[in-house]
Amino acid sequence: MEDEKQREAHIDHDRVIERISPSLYGRAAGMLDKGAVRKIGQRLDESIRHAIGLETNVMVSDIELQIEPANTLGPSLFTVSERAAEKVDIREMMKQFSENHETYEQRQRRQFDAFLLFKSNLSQAKARIILDHFAFNEFEAVIEANGELADNWFALFMNIAKGKLSAVHNLIILLAQALGKKHPARAKDLFILIKGSEPLVRVTFGRARVELNAMAAWAGFSNPVLDELRFLRLDEAATDYDVAQKVLAALMNDQQELLKTYIETKMSREEPAEIARAIMVAGFSDRSEFNDKILAKYHDSTGLIGSAKKAAQNAYERNNWARHWFDEISRAETNQAFWRYSVMFTKIVDGRFEVWEEKYMFQEAPPELFFPSITHQINNRLERWETHRKKDVIWKRSSPSYISKKYYGIDRLKLCVVCLRDAAEIFQGIRSYVRRQFLSQVSYSFIMAIPDSVAASTRTVPMTLHCNLR
């Protein structure tokens, strides 16, 4: 009798698909039987094809879907803000500083109404999948139940027009991640396909807002094809922020050993720029005996490596101190102690908090009661780190590879084939580099040559420019 009641209490899985919102297809894929998941895949296929046909200029605001790794079952919360391009006008920016509360509310309301209209248009176009979130394991379940769809979607995405990539940007990433284990070459092709593309909806993870693209690239198992792509992304990171975010994505996916391999590979090179980048990766990693040894090895270095070591050591020690103060917070027995430790913690914490937060258990009442009161301060500190680290251009401090790559790969500081209109930019970059390499006055000649095609259009002639780098 009891078994009969249990059978009556269970609803048929196919009926579940008919009764739930499409926004819940991801969770359903991880819970229902293979037949129901196959139907979800068929509906996704239809929605993807509608999304590709969507006009990509239907939304002017920046939409972000922030996922909390520790609470994947929570509701999808979107952040809507003005796109950066809309803030170029200085006069408009100054008006926003002096606007009153009513004007601010009106501007926020316009953004909200625009988002609701965007959401409505997607629903009408049967392309709401653009707003829906699928966890990696949920999308993998869809692929496993619909093997033929993976092949169809791969062919569809690889032949899509570039102007249509933004609508299915996130879906391409999910497919690349799902194919990574069995078809790494295909996964790599998909990751390369979206390079330079921007999604209509940015999906980020955690307080540090790590991009979906970075998380997907570092998720899954290690294999030579994808490892090459991962290491290439670390090589191409242009600012401290880029390096920190890519390292954080690796740490959030438990890829510490792969980071260790990258560091060891770079340390075996002779070029100071390669060693400097390895030091920066170690500095933005979490605390470990290996990273301690890497940073200690160059404690008395000068020049290029010394500059990188100083920046990396600063970032590394801040994370160690953040761990220390959070440990004190977790054991704080009084309100005063909690407040004292939280002030120190919120001054130095960065995105690596996502990696080790759960390793500390709150042992007393004050942290249990009051920790939510400092989450806003933590988020503000992470935003400040983002702004600060984006200003530190890594090629200026640790590598002139920007010069050698942009200007036809010619050996740096020897011969730069450039257009005259770029002379000032190159001079400033090389002067900054030389100042870090040599303590004494250096005089250097730059041979400035104009390609024939450019000379014909600009009516300029080759010249030699002698610069005194003091």
Image (cartoon, rainbow, N blue to C red):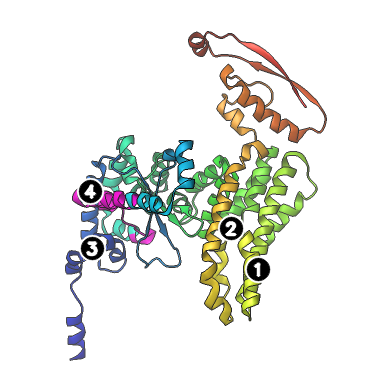
Residue density around tag 4, few if under 14, some if 14–19, many if 20 or more, within 10 Å: some
Q: Amino acid at mark 1?
A: Trp
Question: Quick one: quadrant of the N terminus?
Answer: bottom left
Residue density around tag 3, few if under 14, some if 14–19, many if 20 or more, within 10 Å: few
Whether residue 419 is visible here, answered yes or no, is: no
Residue density around tag 2, few if under 14, some if 14–19, many if 20 or more, within 10 Å: many
Q: Nearer the viewer, mark 4 or mark 3?
A: 4
User: Considering depth in this image, is 57 or 240 the residue closer to the camera?
Assistant: 57
Of marks 4 and 2, which one's residue comes earlier in the chain?
4
Whether residue 43 is visible here, answered yes or no, is: yes
Classify 104 as above or below 23. above
Gap between marks 3 and 2 measured at Cα: 37 Å
Horizontal side, residue 129 vs residue 99: left or right = left
Question: Quick one: quadrant of the C terminus?
Answer: top right
Q: Which mark is residue 21?
A: 3
Q: Which residue is mark 2?
A: 350
Q: Which residue is mark 4?
A: 121
Of marks 4 and 3, which one's residue comes earlier in the chain?
3
What stretch of residues is rendered in magenta?
A: 111-138
Q: Which mark is residue 325?
A: 1
Q: Amino acid at mark 2?
A: Asp
Q: Nearer the viewer, mark 4 or mark 2?
A: 4
Q: Nearer the viewer, mark 3 or mark 1?
A: 1
- Helix, strand, or loop for circle 1? helix
Estimate the x, y position of residue 3 in percent, counting from the top left: 21, 87
Q: Amino acid at mark 4?
A: Asn
- Helix, strand, or loop for circle 2? loop
Q: Quadrant of residue 291?
A: bottom right
Q: Is residue 226 located in the magenta-colored stretch of the structure?
A: no
Gap between marks 3 and 1 measured at Cα: 44 Å
